[in-house]
Image (cartoon, rainbow, N blue to C red):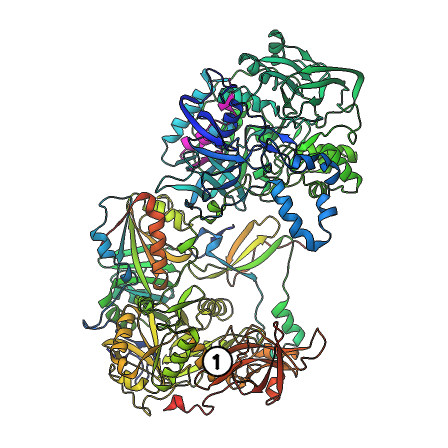
Amino acid sequence: MLHIYCPHCREHREEEEFHVKGQAHIARPLDPESCTDKEWGEYLFFRKNPRGIHHEIWYHSTGCRKFFNVTRDTVSYEIKEVYKIGEQPQVVAKG
Amino acid sequence: MSQKNRLQSGGRIDRSKAMTFSYNGRQYKGYQGDTVASALLANGVDIVGRSFKYSRPRGLVTAGADEPNGILQMGATEATQVPNVRATQQELFDGLVCSATNGWPNAESDMMSILGKVGGKMMPPGFYYKTFMYPQSMWETYEKVIRKAAGFGRSPLENDPDEYDSVNQHCDLMVVGAGPAGLMAALTAARSGARVIIADEQNEFGGHLLSSRERIGGKSAADWVASIVEELASFPDVLMLPRSTVNGYHDHNFLTIHERRTDHIADKAPSGQVRQRMHRVRAHWVVLATGAQERPLVFAHNDVPGCMVASAVSTYINRYGVVPGKQLVLMTTNDGAYQTALDWADAGREVVAVVDTRANPQGELIEAVRKRGIKVITGSAVIEVSGKKRVSGVTVAGIDAKGEKVTGKAHSLLSCDTVASSGGWSPVVHLSCHAGSRPEWRDDIIGFVPGPTVQKQLIAGGITGTYALDKVLAEGAKAGQEATKRLGLTVADVQLPNVRNLREGKPMALFHVPHTKPTSRAPKQFVDYQNDVTAAGIELATREGFESIEHVKRYTAMGFGTDQGKLGNINGMAITAKVLGKTIPETGTTVFRPNYTPITFGAIAGRNCDELFDPKRFSAMHKWHVENGAKFEDVGQWKRPWYFPKAGETMQQSLDRECKATRESVGILDASTLGKIDIQGKDAREFLSRVYTNAWAKLGVGKCRYGLMCKEDGMVFDDGVTSCLGENHFLMTTTTGGAAGVLEWLELYHQTEWPELEVFFTSVTDHWATMTISGPNSRKLLAELTDIDLDKDGFKFMDWRAGTVAGVPARVFRISFTGELSFEINVQANYGLHVWEKLFEHGAKYNLTPYGTETMHILRAEKGFIIAGQDTDGSVHPFDLGMGWCVGNNKPFSYIGKRGMAREDCVRPNRKQLVGLKTKDPKVVLPEGAQAVADPKQAIPMDMLGHVTSSYWSANLGHSIAMGFVKGGLERMGESVYYPLADGRVIEAEICSPIFLDPKGERQNV
Amino acid sequence: MSETLAPEKEGTVNVAVMNQVAGSGARAESPLHHAELDKLAARNPRTGGVMLRELKLLGHLTLRGSQQNESFMNGCAEVLGLALPTQPLTSVEKGSVSIRWISPDEWLVVLPADQAYEVEQGLRAAIEGHFSVVNVSGGQTLLELSGPNARDVLKKSCPLDVHPSQFPVGKVAGTVFAKSTAVVRRSGEESWELVVRRSFADYIWLWLQDASREYGLVIKS
């Protein structure tokens, strides 16, 4: 059970109030029609599964209904930071 | 039987409150303050179970959570049965009924003991893997016999009558363990103003002080504990939880506590009281003050009843006033255990000898024992016990300084009935491991301590390997201060009480007492009592190539029992290390996982059972449905009317009647459960164009349109009608099950991809009660109740109008899921039942017939309308459904799904396509899910062409109808496919259009 | 009664606004109507640790808009007589109107049902730019939990920290409640308001009865 800081409600809440929506920062191609099948397939299906720092989108589904980003260590489950949609992470994997 | 082992005075029991209890069908007496274990020992009950593999008699070994043998089946009635309760932790109450879990048919004379004689050969380590895996088909047969013989207890056959629940807690500091360190930590934090929870598994706070004769701050240990508890109770923000085991320590300082509120009072909780409660705690900081558990020594026949760990013997004497024998031999590797000899002697019983494995022990306690005239045999060990159902004597031999072999041949045989042993202490590191931290070995304390952690965790007392009371108290206070500081509070002053410490000598690291014979030939030396794991078994496992401690554990089943290796694991790891020629840190330890001790399913389920198991959602008209005999169907969490049977009808008869009434006159459906989303903003229309596959640019105010929604991969995931309420205002409907998901989907795209679009989404699913009247007489019926002009040319199909229905402001949508003339009426849900009832008042003359989801399914299937989630499964795009008409290819924006649908795999020929299916025999209804093949005579495995998604009997058409997927189906109209069924039948069906009725759509336009 | 034009350009309907309250001839039922709380209140024990009351058939409006839109913020303040709370998780209240912060661009306004239409019209007249007002009065109801053990019942039902130091009077939080959802607001020292969805109301009613049994539940009308 993670304890997640919602950047909109500005307090920590229990994980059960949230839905995780997978890897963050995957922008929809601006011109899908010009993507090859391979490019589109990569956008659709290919995700990172890092050991360590990972950026995820979470949704405060029972609270403010806002999506936001979480930088989480997949080994220790520590949440390193949360930041709003449109912002960039401060904590990134080395190398 | 009298309490022959009970002392006349002393202990924390109340001799004025005698209690009767039943154990294995016999009545015994004990006192308030007893555990079942202390009461059994008081009554001289030696055998409390039979061992798992060898069926050897077993007695109580410990006085706490680490007890491997005294495992009870509790419960006075069938409904109150609880398995695997530790006798050492179950408080006695009057009328308690229990029996030994292990032992079939009973512990005293065990049928398995005959088998047990051959059991050694029959069940070596790896027994399961070697024997019972083959043939696999026999496992179920083996399992039944083994389980019963093994005695894992049994669950009740009747419903548990008690209440359980869970409570969410938050605190600044969670202190686990209310021994001296925990109490000091809690007191320090509490005085500093922190919100504190302190929990302990025992019935009273105090930890080992409850069985100690030490003095603290000039008071008896018990009085000192009482004074601290009294002060803690005075703080409003301190929650004290005795009888509460912190079972799990999860990520981000989340802990689960299993509190037993009435298990000590009665078999069944008193009326109105919760029996057990789970506390789900989120703590800013945690102090683990879980103490340490004493290790028994491993020697030949060390499982004969009468062999106990030394501290447990002291606990029974000092806390419960019970001396569990007459003549004691104490074997120890350390000074501390000498206290047990003093306690035994003070209780007036004979200490035959203290056998110290060290050659030259020095310390105050040793001097005290010697001064009492008790024989101390040094540099020696008890290498073997004699006796079957109780210890009758021990063989003592000299051992070398490393404890690896017996020196010389001179053995002495001492006569005794009790062997107390102490191999030192193991910090209770379990909770510290739960979030992934690995414990670390410390040679100086001969034990594992918690390793580095990401948790906001502090440790104090025995868990750190600190055992001297003054240091334990100081560590507790320090942890409390540290936590307080980190919380940003001002640390209050707490003075440490004076304690007199004894001078102690160095302990010896000994995990396996040598025998004159090699381990493999020596009598059994038990490491894990509950799973009958012996030192020889561990040696065998390593010989067979299992070198990782995790593999040794699984191969031998060491630590698999209800005690989870609390007693034996460290000895087992040390023995493994020795056999492998490695150090203990090199060998490592297995990792402890939740739960610390077994927990009841009741506590896990809490109040989430029976009526409260899962939320049930009701529409505003639910009461009417119940009163009119509806059968209900679960659609997500909704309870929707399935059909409305009349007296004497079969389900099919009800459906036939509902279907016919709707097509012939008028039917009514409660459609309130459909998801409804209010969409406002100047870019609402643009947004719709991006999330639906079809065009929305030109939909005028007052008009409705059906839309398909796809995921980016081009696969359909929801559908529904969206109405244009205003230029910047739309009402979207979704499937019942898809409502929440669609809203989240819209928000996801709006918030992350297209925040520049000015649009807001608001769920109005619950706000509008929706009722659909459908059938040729629906207009006539509605006309009686509305001020809306229903003229067929003024209020056309796929229009909506506002007005009143039965005096209630309403929006009426002329849309149809049945293919009939239909009106969908939306009113604020508070008026739902009122309008519904008015429709029935006026509908009687038209035979207005309520129908449920099943008739809705049949009527729409007659028209070939899909149900997203039934006729789609996330792998079909609109063209697969024959719904290319619902895909707008000229939309400027590349809407969600467009690119996905154009992938190579989506445009290949021979995809599975949705078609109608007409069985050759019109009376036969295809089962949904049936697989289509081209040639039923083909050898198995046959080539599968697709499957049936929807299939019904159509009373209106007089034949069965079905829809399903068939490879290339849209090009195969008129061809036959075959459906071989599990019962051997093969159903032939002809591929046809899915629109079985009114293909021109004339009925809805009347 | 029928659709009203929001004041927009001549001849176009931008947003459909509707007075959804029926005349006296139509019977309105709250989500817990079937539980007959009034009857229970009449034959209730007088004492208990938890009091429950349905504040039924009120007007509920969901307001969406940007705090950066001055017209929106001013228009709301003017029409509602109260400024929208911008501090997260807070609420404001004046007379029969209360406003709960739901998210940085969403508020729930609770007011007498017969004012909902008038207020919505007022807002639409007063505000320019992008915003939305949605009447959700039929879709939810307000439950008031009070008494010395109300907090204990909340702790059994939702994962919020409801300690007075963390949840002062006036605080609002949307959360998981009894496996459903609720917007929880502390309305007084010992009183709390729950906004619950209509379809879940019966389940939550069953849950609350069960969770408060050990303290004694008093139904108030």
Would you say residue A68 is visible in this rendering? yes
Instruction: Report which residue position mark 1 lands on.
Output: B953
* Figure quadrant of the C terminus of chain A: bottom right
Judging from the image, mark 1 belongs to the subunit labelled B
- The kind of residue tagged 1 is Trp
Q: Looking at the picture, does residue B123 appear above or below residue B930? A: above
User: Percent position (x, y) of residue B922?
Assistant: 52, 85
Of the pair B886 and C90, the residue shown nearer to us? B886
What span is in magenta? Answer: B184-213
User: Percent position (x, y) of residue B886?
Assistant: 50, 84
Q: In this figure, what is the number of numbered marks?
A: 1
Q: Is residue B865 left or right of residue C182?
A: right
Question: Which residue is rendered at x = 75% and y = 23% of the image?
Answer: B403
Secondary element at image label 1? strand
Question: Which residue is rendered at x = 43% and y = 34% of the image?
Answer: B264
Would you say residue B683 is visible in this rendering? no
Of the pair B848 and B830, the residue shown nearer to us? B848
